[in-house]
Image: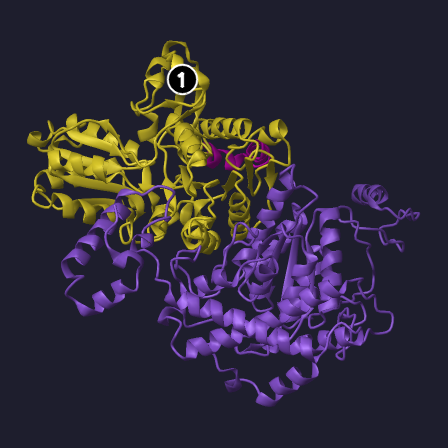
C-alpha cells in the first residue's frame, strides 16, 4: 500500500461529517467534506451567482401597495392614530424643509458657503420609518439624507437652521457645510462629507455598546448610507467587522437609484446591496423603502435580530431620489423629466401613507391643509430667525482642533488677530466680513 | 544534514563544499534586526538607579506623593516588552480599554501583545480581519463612545488604507462637531523605520504624511523606558495619537524599565547630550547613529582620522531626541539653536516633504539672524527603500558625521 493513500484516506475518515463509508482505493466514488470548512465536495463543476438560488431578484418586503392598501398577507403594524399622525407629519416636514431651504438658497439668503443642501425628496418613508423603529438612544451614524431621524428624535427647527446658516447657535460652530448635523443629546453622530466613513465607525460604536454593561443588549449602533456609498471599502470593512468580531450594528442602505448622476446600472452589477449581506454571513432583508409601515416593520425586526445575535444585520430600502442630488445639481441633465414625474405620481411614499390613513378615517383634507400651513409657517419662522443671527465668533476657527491649544495654533491665531487689528477697520472686504461675525471678529483672549 | 549526505555520495564535491559551506559560517542577522550603533550605545539606562532618574518621569500611582524613588523596582525589558508592559497597565487600570488589530491575540508579529489575551480575555484583546481602514474606523467609533481604543497597524507601511479615516475623520472629529464629540481615547500603534532587511514595504517612516493632519498627535520613542512612558501618555492623552515604534529596536534596545505606572510628557523634546557648538536633532533609530557619529567626531578611529580636521574634534554637539513629532517642541529646539547657532536634522524618511523641512522652516524663521550655517537635513534619499541599498539609504554614523563637519565649518 502506498503510504500516501493510507494517510489520505484516514484524513478523509476523520474529517468528513456525513459518515459515509469509504473505499480504500485512491479513486474513491464516495465523497465527503473539506476538512477545515466542512464544505461538501462535489464532482460536478458548477458555478453559482445567485443569492436566491434561482437567479431571481431578491424580493422586497411590502405592507401597503402604492394606493395605501394592505397587500395580501400583509402584516399591518398595530399603530394608533396619534402615531400615524406623527409618522405623517415628520414625512411631510422633510419636503417642506427642502422647499424652503432650496428657495432660500436660490434667493441667495443662505450664505454663499452653504450653497449645497442635500435634498430628501422621495425618501421620506425610508428615514421616518427607520427612525420610528429605532430606540431614541440607539447610536445613529448617518450619511446626509437622514435629517428625518434627528427631527423624529426632537431636534428643533432652530437647531436645523442654525447649522444650515452656520450661525453662532450652531452646535457645530459653523465649521461644516449645510446638513452636517450632529447632536450628542440625540445620539446622532456628527455627519462628515467623506462617504461611507461612518459605516466602519458604526461597527466600533456597536462594540462599545456591547462592552458597556449599562447598554449591552439594549441599544444598537445604526449606520445609514446610500447605495453609491456602499461601493466604498468602508462598507466592506464595516460589515465584515460587525459580522465577525461581532458587534451589534444595523446597516441601513437607502437604494435611491442614483449617486449624483450615476445610476445603479453603473454603480454595481450584482443584485443591489442586499446580495452582499450573505457574503459576510449577515442577516439581510430588502424592503420597499417607499412603504413607511414596511420599513418600520423591517427595521424593527432587524433591530431585534441585531440585539439578540449581537451581530450585523443589513436592511436595503428600495426608493427613488425624486429630487436632485443637491441644490448644486440639475438632474434633468442625466435623466428624463418624465421618469421623475412618473415616479412622483405613481410611487409616492407620502401619498401612499395618506391614502392608508384616509382609509382608516384618520385623515382628511382639512387636516392636510392645516398641516401644510403649520409646517410651512414653522419652517419659515425658524428660517427668518436664523437669518438674523450672527456667524460664530472668529476665535472658533482655532478652537477644538486639539483638546488643548498647541503653540502653532496659538501663534497663528495671534497672527490673524494682529492682521485684523491692522487692516480690519480700513479694508472694506474685511470690514464687511467681520460685521457678520459675533463680536465683530474682535480679538478675544 | 543535506550537505553531509551529498558529500558522502559525491566525494568530489566535498572540497567545494568545504570551502563554501564552512562550519564557522557567519551567523545570520537576528530576525529583529541589528544595529551596531544600538548595540554600542551608552544612552540606555541599564541600571535601576539611572532608570529611576529618567528626566520627566511622572508616577501615575498613589505612591507618587510619598516620593519613594529609592524603593521603586525596575525590570530588564526590551522595547516590545516595554510596549507590552504599558498595554498591560492600561488594560488593568481602564475597564474600557481594548486592544485590537491583525494577529494581536496570539501575541502579535512583534510580540508586543504576548499573553494579554490570556490575561485580559478575548473580548478585550482580539484579532480583527485584515482591513486597516476598518481597524481605524472601528477604533474611531469605539473612541467616539468614550472608550479607550488601542489599535495596531501591523507595519507603518500599511497605514495608508487608514489615511482617510485618520486624516479626514480622526483628526477633525472634535473640530467638526463643535467640540461635542471627540475621540481622545484612540491610540494607533505601528512599527516603523528600517530593520535591515525590510525593503520597500517593511521599512517606511510615514510620520511626514501626517504633519498636515492637525488634530492628530504623532509620537516616536527611542528606548524601552521612553516607549513605556510615552505610550501610557499617548493612551491617556485626550487627543487621537499615532504611536510609531522603531521596529529594529524591539529586541535590540534593552533597559531597566520601572515596573510601576509612569508617564513621560508628550510634545517635550529631550536633550540627551548637552552641547554648545551644534544642535543635532533626530528621533527613533537615528538617535543611535547620531550618538555614534559624535563618538567618531570626538575620537576618530585611525581609518577616519585623516578626514576629520583636528579643529573639529573638540566640537560639543548637543543631541536632542524630538520624541513627539506633532505637535513638536519648538521651544526646546529653538532655545538650543539660539545657543549653538547650527542645526542638523536627521531622519530616515526621505528628504522631500519630510518632517525636517517643517522644522528647518520654523527654526529659520525664529533664529535666522543667529544661524551661522543653513539648517542641514540628513535623511533617506528621495527613493523607495530598496532592499539591497539600505545601508547607503538610511543615514548612518558616517553620513551624519560628514554633515556635522560640513555644518561646523560652513
Residue A384 is situated, as x and y percent measured from the top left of the image, at 43, 70
Q: Give the magenta-colored segment's residue range.
A: B1-18
Give percent across and percent down for residue A125. Answer: 66, 69
Chain with colour purple in the figure: A
Chain letter, colour yellow in render: B
Where residue B348 sits: x, y (%)?
31, 43
| Residue shown at the point (69%, 80%) measured from the top left | A365
Asked whether residue A119 appears in the rendered view, the answer is: no
Q: Which quadrant is the N terminus of chain B positioned in? A: top right
Q: Quadrant of the C terminus of chain B?
A: top left
Local crowd size for mark 1, using a 10 Å CA cut-off: few (<14), some (14–19), many (≥20)? few
Residue located beneath label 1 in the image: B64
Q: Is B66 left, or right, of B379 in this rendering? A: right
Judging depth in this view, the residue of B290 and A92 nearest the camera is A92
Position of A364 relative to A213 (above/below): below
Q: Is residue B176 above or below residue B344?
A: below
Task: Based on the picture, tell me whether residue A411 belongs to the magenta stretch.
Answer: no
Q: Quadrant of residue A405?
A: top left
Let me know if residue B12 is in the magenta part: yes
Residue at mark 1: chain: B
- Give the vertical position of A211 relative to A103 (above or below): above
Q: Is residue B409 found left or right of B233 in the rendered image? A: left
Left-right relation of B118 to B28: right
Which is the main secondary structure of the residues drawn in magenta? helix
As helix, strand or loop, the secondary structure at mark 1 comes to: helix
Q: Nearer the viewer, residue B393 or B318?
A: B318
Frontmost residue, B410 versus A318? A318
B152 or A147: nearer the eye?
A147
Q: Position of residue B161 (x, y in %)?
A: 48, 54
Q: What residue sits 54% from the left and 56% below the top?
A: A198
For residue B381, side relative to residue A188 (left or right): left
Amino acid at each position: 500500500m502506498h503510504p500516501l493513500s493510507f494517510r489520505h484516506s484516514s484524513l478523509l475518515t476523520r474529517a468528513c461529517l456525513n459518515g459515509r463509508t469509504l473505499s480504500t482505493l485512491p479513486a474513491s466514488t464516495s465523497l465527503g467534506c473539506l476538512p477545515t470548512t466542512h464544505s461538501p465536495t462535489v464532482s460536478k463543476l458548477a458555478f453559482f451567482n445567485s443569492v436566491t438560488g434561482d437567479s431571481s431578484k431578491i424580493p422586497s418586503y411590502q405592507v401597503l401597495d402604492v394606493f395605501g392598501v394592505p397587500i395580501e398577507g400583509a402584516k399591518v403594524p398595530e399603530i394608533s392614530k396619534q402615531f400615524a399622525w406623527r409618522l405623517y407629519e415628520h414625512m411631510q416636514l422633510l419636503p417642506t424643509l427642502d422647499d424652503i431651504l432650496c428657495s432660500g438658497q436660490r434667493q441667495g439668503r443662505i450664505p454663499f458657503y452653504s450653497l449645497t443642501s442635500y435634498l430628501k425628496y422621495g425618501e421620506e418613508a425610508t428615514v421616518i420609518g427607520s427612525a420610528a423603529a429605532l430606540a431614541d438612544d440607539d447610536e445613529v451614524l448617518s450619511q446626509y439624507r437622514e435629517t428625518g431621524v434627528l427631527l423624529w428624535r426632537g431636534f428643533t427647527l432652530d437647531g436645523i437652521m442654525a447649522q444650515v446658516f452656520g450661525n453662532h447657535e450652531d452646535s457645530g460652530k459653523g465649521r461644516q457645510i449645510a446638513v452636517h448635523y450632529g447632536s450628542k443629546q440625540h445620539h446622532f453622530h456628527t455627519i462628515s462629507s467623506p462617504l461611507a466613513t461612518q459605516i466602519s465607525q458604526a461597527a466600533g460604536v456597536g462594540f462599545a455598546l456591547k462592552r458597556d454593561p449599562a447598554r449591552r443588549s439594549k441599544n444598537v449602533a445604526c449606520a445609514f448610507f446610500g447605495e453609491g456609498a456602499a461601493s466604498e471599502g468602508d462598507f466592506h470593512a464595516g460589515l465584515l467587522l460587525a459580522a465577525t468580531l461581532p458587534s451589534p450594528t444595523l446597516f441601513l442602505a437607502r437604494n435611491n437609484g442614483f449617486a449624483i448622476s450615476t445610476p445603479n446600472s453603473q454603480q454595481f452589477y450584482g443584485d443591489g446591496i442586499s446580495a452582499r449581506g450573505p457574503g459576510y454571513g449577515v442577516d439581510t432583508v430588502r424592503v420597499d423603502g417607499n412603504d413607511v409601515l414596511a420599513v418600520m416593520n423591517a427595521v424593527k425586526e432587524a433591530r431585534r435580530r441585531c440585539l439578540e445575535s449581537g451581530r450585523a444585520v443589513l436592511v436595503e430600502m428600495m426608493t427613488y431620489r425624486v429630487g436632485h442630488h443637491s441644490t448644486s445639481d440639475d438632474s434633468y441633465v442625466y435623466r428624463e423629466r418624465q421618469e421623475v414625474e412618473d415616479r412622483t405620481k405613481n410611487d409616492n411614499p407620502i401619498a401612499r401613507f395618506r391614502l392608508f390613513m384616509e382609509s382608516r378615517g384618520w385623515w382628511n383634507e382639512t387636516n392636510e391643509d392645516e398641516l401644510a400651513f403649520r409646517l410651512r409657517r414653522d419652517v419659515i419662522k425658524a428660517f427668518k430667525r436664523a437669518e438674523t443671527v450672527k456667524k460664530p465668533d472668529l476665535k472658533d476657527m482655532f478652537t477644538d482642533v486639539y483638546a488643548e491649544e498647541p503653540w502653532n495654533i496659538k501663534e497663528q491665531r495671534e497672527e490673524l488677530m494682529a492682521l485684523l487689528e491692522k487692516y480690519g477697520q480700513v479694508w472694506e472686504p474685511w470690514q464687511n466680513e467681520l460685521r457678520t461675525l459675533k463680536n465683530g471678529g474682535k480679538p478675544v483672549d | 544534514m543535506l550537505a553531509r549526505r551529498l558529500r558522502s555520495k559525491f566525494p568530489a564535491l566535498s572540497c567545494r563544499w568545504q570551502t563554501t559551506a564552512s562550519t564557522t559560517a557567519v551567523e545570520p542577522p537576528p530576525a529583529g534586526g541589528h544595529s551596531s550603533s544600538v548595540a554600542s550605545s551608552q544612552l540606555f539606562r541599564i541600571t535601576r538607579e539611572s532608570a529611576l532618574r529618567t528626566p520627566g518621569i511622572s508616577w501615575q500611582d498613589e505612591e507618587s506623593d510619598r516620593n519613594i524613588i529609592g524603593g521603586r523596582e525596575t525590570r530588564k525589558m526590551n522595547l516590545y516588552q516595554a510596549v507590552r508592559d504599558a498595554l498591560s497597565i492600561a488594560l488593568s487600570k481602564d475597564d474600557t480599554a481594548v486592544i485590537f488589530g491583525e494577529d494581536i491575540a496570539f501575541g502579535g508579529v512583534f510580540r508586543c501583545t504576548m499573553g494579554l489575551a490570556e490575561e485580559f480575555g478575548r473580548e478585550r484583546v482580539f484579532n480583527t480581519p485584515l482591513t486597516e481602514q476598518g481597524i481605524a474606523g472601528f477604533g474611531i467609533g469605539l473612541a467616539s463612545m468614550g472608550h479607550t481604543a488601542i489599535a495596531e497597524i501591523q507595519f507603518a507601511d500599511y497605514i495608508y488604507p487608514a489615511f482617510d479615516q485618520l486624516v479626514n475623520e480622526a483628526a477633525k472629529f472634535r473640530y467638526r462637531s463643535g467640540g461635542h464629540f471627540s475621540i481622545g481615547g484612540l491610540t494607533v500603534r505601528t512599527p516603523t523605520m528600517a530593520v535591515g532587511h525590510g525593503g520597500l514595504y517593511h521599512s517606511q517612516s510615514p510620520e511626514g504624511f501626517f504633519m498636515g493632519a492637525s488634530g492628530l498627535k504623532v509620537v516616536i520613542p527611542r528606548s524601552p523606558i521612553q516607549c513605556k512612558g510615552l505610550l501610557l501618555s499617548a493612551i491617556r492623552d485626550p487627543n487621537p495619537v499615532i504611536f510609531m515604534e522603531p521596529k529594529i529596536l524591539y529586541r535590540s534596545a534593552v533597559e531597566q524599565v520601572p515596573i510601576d505606572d509612569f508617564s513621560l510628557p508628550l510634545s517635550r523634546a529631550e536633550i540627551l547630550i548637552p552641547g554648545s557648538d551644534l544642535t543635532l536633532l533626530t528621533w527613533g533609530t537615528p538617535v543611535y547613529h547620531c550618538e555614534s557619529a559624535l563618538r567618531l567626531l570626538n575620537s576618530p578611529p585611525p581609518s577616519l582620522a585623516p578626514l576629520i580636521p583636528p579643529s573639529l574634534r573638540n566640537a560639543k554637539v548637543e543631541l536632542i531626541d524630538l520624541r513627539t513629532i506633532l505637535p513638536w517642541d519648538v521651544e526646546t529646539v529653538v532655545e538650543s539653536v539660539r545657543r549653538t547657532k547650527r542645526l542638523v536634522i536627521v531622519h530616515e524618511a526621505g528628504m522631500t516633504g519630510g518632517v525636517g523641512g517643517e522644522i528647518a522652516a520654523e527654526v529659520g524663521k525664529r533664529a535666522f539672524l543667529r544661524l551661522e550655517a543653513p539648517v542641514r537635513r540628513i535623511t533617506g534619499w528621495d527613493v523607495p527603500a530598496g532592499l539591497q541599498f539600505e545601508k547607503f539609504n538610511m543615514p548612518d554614523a558616517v553620513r551624519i558625521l560628514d554633515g556635522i563637519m560640513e555644518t561646523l565649518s560652513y
